[in-house]
Amino acid sequence: MTPRVLTGDRPTGPLHLGHYFGTLRNRVRLQHDYDMIVIIADYQVLIDRDVADRLGETVDGLLLDYLAAGLDPGCTTIFTHSAVPALNQLLLPFLSLVSVPELQRNPTVKDEIQHSRQSSVSGLMFTYPVHQAADILFCKGNLVPVGQDQLPHIEMTRTVARRFNERYGPVFPIPEGLLSDAPLLPGTDGRKMSKSRGNAIALSAGPDEVARLVKGATTDADRHISYDPEGRPGVSGLVQLAALCLDRDPSELAGEIGDAGAAVLKRTVTEAVNEFLAPMRERRAAYAKDMQFVRNLLKSGNARANELADQTLREVQVAMGTNY
Ligand code: TRP
């Protein structure tokens, strides 16, 4: 059987180049060789209610980002987990398999609590990693491409699957996390590209916006351009961005620019990014003309996810002896 890849995103806003080089590119590459299922984790967004406004619009935008980036609607399943009741029902038996201290120990959750702007921490904050286990196990996902910060959740998923199988009999395969080998992409200020830092270039950015963002990027006083991520994060971030878009070696590219300075570096970056985004802009414009098609894609993704989830829930009920 074709191994199943399950991965996805919280719909918190537009995807940017950091997402592209970090995960989207891999999804596009893997989609023809695996059964690729992409989850839009719209319930998970509720851990931060400030970004959970107007979820419908954000989901539309995310669908367009996926299609623009090259996910092929002919072979990739895209779904929202809120539309799949049987997936959500798995949360209850799964929660019974983990202890409260285990939930409290999760380093990613701790980090999110620390950075949360909410005045109090919701129950969902502590339990969403178990819900994420349901996201992965409802379809018996084998491979889960994720970033480093998601590894505690993969570990939680493996624990839940193992404990379920031990207690009730073998239902779930134990999934593997797949870390991307892409280097973290710095944003326009040399720090990790992230929407909340305001240093991101969205995949949906137009040519003028790209030019403006790159123009405003942080460089330094040394006129000579070199690639030295530790010592010169601003300049090196720009070099890396251009190198990724041009599929070139960053040190070599920096060497070519050399004494031409930051202005030429920025022009190179702007041109490289705009050229790179051009086919995505074309695809986005084509799909955006037919939002009915785009939403139907989600509908059929949700229908498939429901079939898979219903089947798994039936197996769970048989294993637990609750198939009345
Ligand atoms: N937690 C992931 C993120 O913040 C999103 C996500 C939800 C996910 N469910 C998933 C990722 C299942 C991989 C598999 O980006």
Image (cartoon, rainbow, N blue to C red):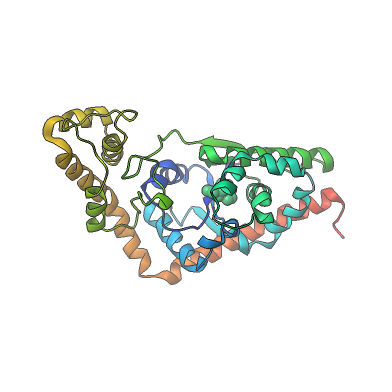
Residue 221 locus on image (x, y percent): 20, 35
Q: Nearer the viewer, residue 62 or 234?
A: 234
Which image quarter holds the N terminus?
top right
Q: Quadrant of the C terminus?
A: bottom right
253 w.r.t. 213: above or below? above
Instruction: Check the image and name the residue furthest to the left.
Output: 260
Q: In this image, 172 relative to 151: left or right? A: right
Quarter-of-image position of residue 234: top left
Front-lying residue, 125 or 15: 125
What's the residue at 68%, 62% (across, down)?
85
Q: Position of residue 65 (x, y in %)?
A: 40, 57
Front residue of this view, candidates 219 and 312: 219
- Nearer to me, 77 or 15: 15
* Side of 315 relative to 174 (left or right): right
> Which residue occupies 41% across, 53% down?
15
Position above or below: 281 against 96:
below
* Number of numbered tags placed on the structure image: 0
Residue name at image x 32 percent, y 34 percent: 233
| Residue drawn at the location 60% of the way across and 63% of the way down | 303
Query: Is residue 101 visible to the viewer in this orientation of the structure?
Result: yes
Q: Is residue 138 visible?
A: no
